[in-house]
Amino acid sequence: MGKILELKDVSKIYGDLHALSHINLTVNEGDWLSIMGPSGSGKTTMLNIIGCMDTPSQGSVILDGVDISRESAAGLTKIRRDKIGLIFQQFHLISYLTALENVMVAQYYHSMPDRDEAMEALEKVGLASRAHHLPTQLSGGEQQRVCIARALINSPRILLGDEPTGNLDEENERIVVDLFHRLHDEGVTLIVVTHDPEVGDVAQRKIVLEYGRLAQDVDQRASFSGVLKL
Amino acid sequence: MANNRQKMYLRMVTSSLVRRASRLIIAVLAVAIGATILSGLVTIYYDIPRQLGREFRSYGANLLLLPKGDARISRADLKTVREVLGDDRVVGMAPYRYQTVKINEQPYIIAGTDLPEAKKNSPFWYVEGEWGSASRPDHVMVGREIANTLNLSIGDSFKVLGVRFGHAAEASAQDLSAQQNRVRDEGEQNFSARLVVCGIVTTGGAEEGFIFADVDMLDELVGDRFRGDVVECSVVAGAEEMEALTAQLESALPGIQPRAVRRLTQSQDIVLGKLQSLVLLVTVVVLIITMISVSTTMMAMVAERRREIALKKALGAENRFVIGELLGEGVLLGVIGSAAGVFLGFEFATRVSLNVFGRAINFPWPVVPVTIVVFVAITVLASVLPVRKVMDIHPAIVLRGE
């Protein structure tokens, strides 16, 4: 598998605060990587930089062969639209659109909305029967699955999750991790920021950040099952 | 036919308004109230000349037609005058024929006229009793001054004597007895008639010294066809229009001299001009207030939807897409609010017109598209500044909750 992402000596500095400090990281296509660490360790900052929502103060980030650290805001928006799928802890569904329409919104900004494709994406996450429900009519787990369907709809090169199970109960956490497992089997590259050691442990690889530095880089392929043990 | 992108755009814009109706009710109300006042004031603005023109007509005739030289005004002339002026402009058109008569050997003047038309011209006359009419030709109205002099009351009758048309009046001869004078007064060259007082006219002016009778009855008494001494017209027209009408009348009737009562037409124009300026000023103020109100609401809306906007940007939406959606909502909001407001505005204008002028107004259909277009433009204009805030929303910061 080729490299999909490469961070070279990446730092993010806010005044005197070094949110990220000299990070070097390579992720191959199809990898499932967990980013762990205590609060304020720089996990989300790193995810935002990889997800083209922020830029590094130093160093370079190569995503799918493009140095995104040198891209303009418009260029980053385009890369985000074409190559990245985002999953949020708070789900962030648009409250006045149905589940199906929330998926179609991502298509709308990417290319052309296609109702059938959006419905297929919902079927894939087991929510076809809830397609015409508003977010307020869905449980937390269902909302997160809509969020995953939306992230997948444009076939992104890389799927980024920021605490995707942080707001879910055990049952829904298991459903979401199972979904990640299936996606990984299909060759989707997954990078998941999590506080939860059980979710972090199911990935192929785990890195731990501390004070903005890469403290651990653990290859878990030996014990990798992709199944959550609760 | 709309493609899937356009359909999705419409779905997002309409869903946002329909499913968030409670949040947007203030903005819709702001636009609706503004549109109500605007369409109401515009309706009144265009209807004021008609309404006030009619109102000014209660101050009396504003156009006099006088014969040139010794000529008199004929029935054919009257017909031409009405054609030139137009039925829709003429409130009243009363021709007058003046005839000197004697009552108790004292000279008085009978003004023969079309009494219903005279009534339309002079609604300010105070008439005790009732107006005369052609159906009761011997019933006449007398001025307050004559009523006092002759001690006449409603229902009293009195005898008038006069000289028939074509004969010269002769003074009473002192060398004849009263009997001989009476025989001469009742001779072929003279006429006499007994008239009944049906109304006493009080105006505070010269009218109190006249007897007002049906003109056809007077023509019959004097034994002549109609020969008018003056025609009083009450015409709904401003100063410029009146000038044009008098020019047309002069050209159509060379023997008649039309004279506009400038004091009335000019006052009318001044009052109308001031009222219209006032309405225009209020309209501009209302538009500015509406714009501020919509702008504030849109500002709040953008602030409230920061997460949604940030999400859209995170999904790859360019600023122009998000701005386009918000402006689309603004347009729809403007259409809904102004459509509601335009009909409420007509109701408002009708009530104002009924209360102030005592008349209903016509629904001006062109006001509908004009109001909607103006308010859509105002809503879009008012949304531009708040919507530009979209560009400052940073998805990473907003979605993280900072």
Image (spheres, coloured by chain):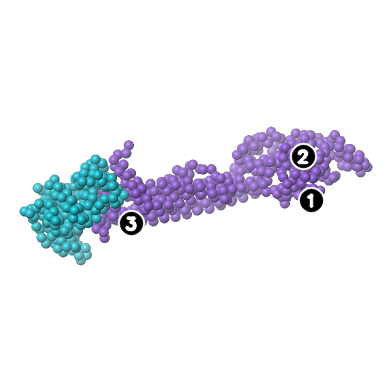
> Badge 3 local density, few (<14 within 10 Å), some, or many (20+)?
some
Question: Do the residues at pointers 3 and 2 share their chain?
Answer: yes
Nearest to N terminus: mark 2 or mark 1: 2
Q: Chain of mark 1?
A: B
Nearest to N terminus: mark 1 or mark 3: 1
Q: Which residue is mark 1?
A: B148
Q: Residue at x 87, y 42 (%)?
A: B171
Nearest to N terminus: mark 3 or mark 2: 2
Coordinates of residue B354 in the picture (x, y in percent): 56, 48
Whether residue B386 is visible to the viewer of this picture, yes or no, is: no
- From the viewer's side, name the closer residue of A163 and B305: A163
Question: Do the residues at pointers 2 and 1 share their chain?
Answer: yes
Image colour assigned to chain B = purple
Residue B138 got which mark? 2
Question: Do the residues at pointers 1 and 3 share their chain?
Answer: yes
Instruction: Say above or below: B67 vs B345.
Output: above
> Badge 1 local density, few (<14 within 10 Å), some, or many (20+)?
few
Q: Amino acid at mark 3?
A: Ala
Q: Amino acid at mark 2?
A: Asp
Quarter of the image that includes the C terminus of chain B: bottom left
Q: Residue at x 81, y 43 (%)?
A: B158
Coordinates of residue B267 in the picture (x, y in percent): 62, 50
Quarter of the image that includes the N terminus of chain B: top left
Q: SS at mark 1? A: helix
**Looking at the colours in the rendered structure, which chain would you say is drawn in cyan?**
A
Q: Nearer the viewer, mark 3 or mark 2?
A: 2
